[in-house]
Image (spheres, rainbow, N blue to C red):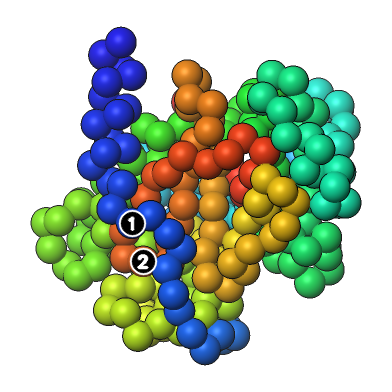
Amino acid sequence: MIKYFTFLLVVGFILIYTSCGKNDDKENGTNNNNDKNIPNCGTVTDIDGNTYNTVLIGNQCWMRENLKTTKLNDGTAISHLSNTNDWAANDQPASIAVSAYSWYNNDYNNYGRIYGALYNLTAIRTEKLCPQGWHVPDSYDWVEMFQSLSSQGHSYPHSVTPLKVAKALADNTRWQKSKALGAVGNNLSVNNISGFTALPGGYRNSNGSFSHEGKCIKYWINQQGFQELCIIAFNENTPLMKFLHNNSGAYVRCVKSN
């Protein structure tokens, strides 16, 4: 009960914005971060043979790329639901729906290769989506990372106000330009000091449609006791948590288990 209450306080604390916001003029620059200067813990390979770079943030080791496996780590295939009607028809409680994934706009070459796969909540709840020794982060994993960046002075603007770390996490390419001070699309050149490299892959709605590529990205949280939760990042200066329909498609960043 204490952990449940603490989680509600955390969510309430960082629930500052409720939409992906408005940006304009897409930026397609080149990441100017020097990979050699980004602390990491090597690479990790999923069961499909995809190899991911990593980044150390505080005491945590995160994948630096979104997951794109098409199988659980025990070899079980995840259903590829590309058809809009098939995705919408899978709109069931997470305990009933099939584990599913898709690529944004059903286009691996132009989107999936860059952004990774969109998964539904049922796939998250299997506890077998990430490679062995890694897991889908819960809210405490995310908040620990946000607080670590904030304590290192990577909030925007530089202040003691916590969790304004979106620009430190967002890549400096592909985000649409924004005139809003503090948005990740405002002065992209200063983004991604953490090396986390969040790209604006959008998300998939529960009805099977795709939305907001270039403007935002949604990541799943694996939080037991909550049936419809994800983290939404990072087009404004503060990441936020928000309830999301369990048949929605969102991305996954795995974090190494202790």
Circle 2/circle 1 CB separation < 8 Å: yes
Provide residue 124's location: percent of width, then percent of height. Answer: 64, 31
Q: Residue at x 30, y 10 (%)?
A: 1
Q: Is residue 19 visible?
A: yes
Is residue 48 among the parts visible in the rendering? no
4, above or below 107, in the image: above
Q: Which residue is mark 1?
A: 17
**Image disc number at residue 147:** none
Q: Is residue 100 left or right of residue 115?
A: right
Q: Amino acid at mark 2?
A: Glu
N-term-proximal mark, 2 vs 1: 1
Q: Report the residue marked by disc 2.
A: 236
The residue drawn where x is 86% and y is 26% is 76
Residue situated in front as seen by the camera: 51 or 170: 170
Residue at 62% in and 49% down: 251
Residue type indicated by callout 1: Tyr
Of residue 113 and residue 122, the one placed in the foreground of this image is 122
In front here: 211 or 46? 211
Local secondary structure at mark 2: loop
